[in-house]
Image (tube, rainbow, N blue to C red):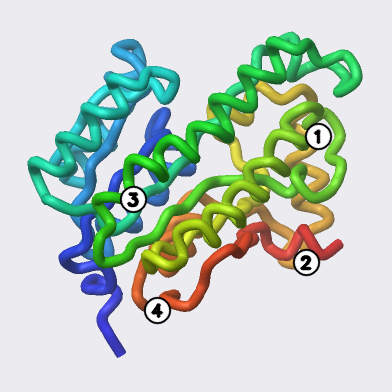
Amino acid sequence: MQPMSDLLAGKKGLVVGIANEHSIAAGCAGAFRACGADLAVTYQSEKARKFVAPVADAVGADILMPLDVTDAAQMEAVFDAVRARWGRLDFLLHSVAFCPREDLHGRVVDCSRDGFAIAMDVSVHSLIRLARGAEPLMGEGGTILTVSYHGAEKVVDHYNIMGPVKAALEATARYLSVDLGPQNIRVNALSPGPLRTRAASGIAHFDELIEDAKARAPLQRLTTIEEVGAMAACLVSDFARSVSGNTAYIDGGHHVV
């Protein structure tokens, strides 16, 4: 059996979506590094950099660059830097979602056209753009991961328009797995249970959602960013070389209840 510290030895990965040390992407980055991967890390804005830089330092990131996923020039610059530093990319983690507050907190039927368009662009089409940029760097195959939530499959109180958005994200991941499969590029979605992240704090009545998830989950507890990271590391490793087009639940079994 291969030692876990060598599971991703020699692999090069790009992590997009770290907000701070408590974010899902930070947990994944920590797991990738613990398994031996070399990492490139991005931050959304200069304001965010001070929260992301300590995570990048902790995982020994070779590259730390700005990336607003709506900025095509920044995205191109990140892939250029990866190409210049490593010449290839073995895996990519997309952990990005956004919806204007007024649309997130309202009923789906009341969601504005602009709010829906913004949520879909930032949360879903950004995955397509990143996959397009990663494809030429994955000449020998690779893995792309995105982060979803159970609200994509079932109606979750107060998740509102992000439910349809995450459903679109999971469908996009499945279609990308077919598009990129001939290049031996695997695409999967992670679906963690609710976690106390900065992004989740924008959901109304989030504490109630947390307590309900804990009560309903067969394991009777919440998951952690470290546990999500462990699943992510497995999925980008060769142990999961035949796994593509899947949604992997890391929620203590909550999704079955």
Which residue is at 29% across, 20% downward?
Answer: 73
**What residue would you read off at disc 3?**
135
**What is the CA distance from the residue labelled 1 to the residue labelled 3?**
41 Å
- Say whether residue 149 is left or right of residue 182: right
- Say whether residue 228 is left or right of residue 138: right
Q: Which picture quadrant has residue 111?
A: top right
Q: Are marks 4 and 3 in contact (CB under 8 Å)?
A: no
**What is the CA distance from the residue labelled 2 to the residue labelled 1?**
18 Å
**What residue would you read off at disc 4?**
239
**What residue would you read off at disc 1?**
208
Q: Does dot 3 land on a helix, a strand or a loop?
A: helix
Q: Are marks 1 and 4 in contact (CB under 8 Å)?
A: no
Q: Which picture quadrant has residue 22?
A: top left
Q: Which picture quadrant has residue 104?
A: top right
Which residue is at 73% across, 41% downward?
Answer: 210
Foreground mark, 4 or 2, reads: 4
Residue type marked 1: Glu
The x and y percentages for residue 29 are: 34, 48
Q: Residue furthest bottom?
A: 1
Q: Does dot 4 land on a helix, a strand or a loop?
A: helix
Residue type marked 3: Glu
Q: Which mark is residue 218?
A: 2
Which residue is at 86% across, 62% downward?
Answer: 257
Q: Does dot 2 land on a helix, a strand or a loop?
A: loop
Foreground mark, 2 or 3, reads: 3
Q: Does dot 1 land on a helix, a strand or a loop?
A: helix
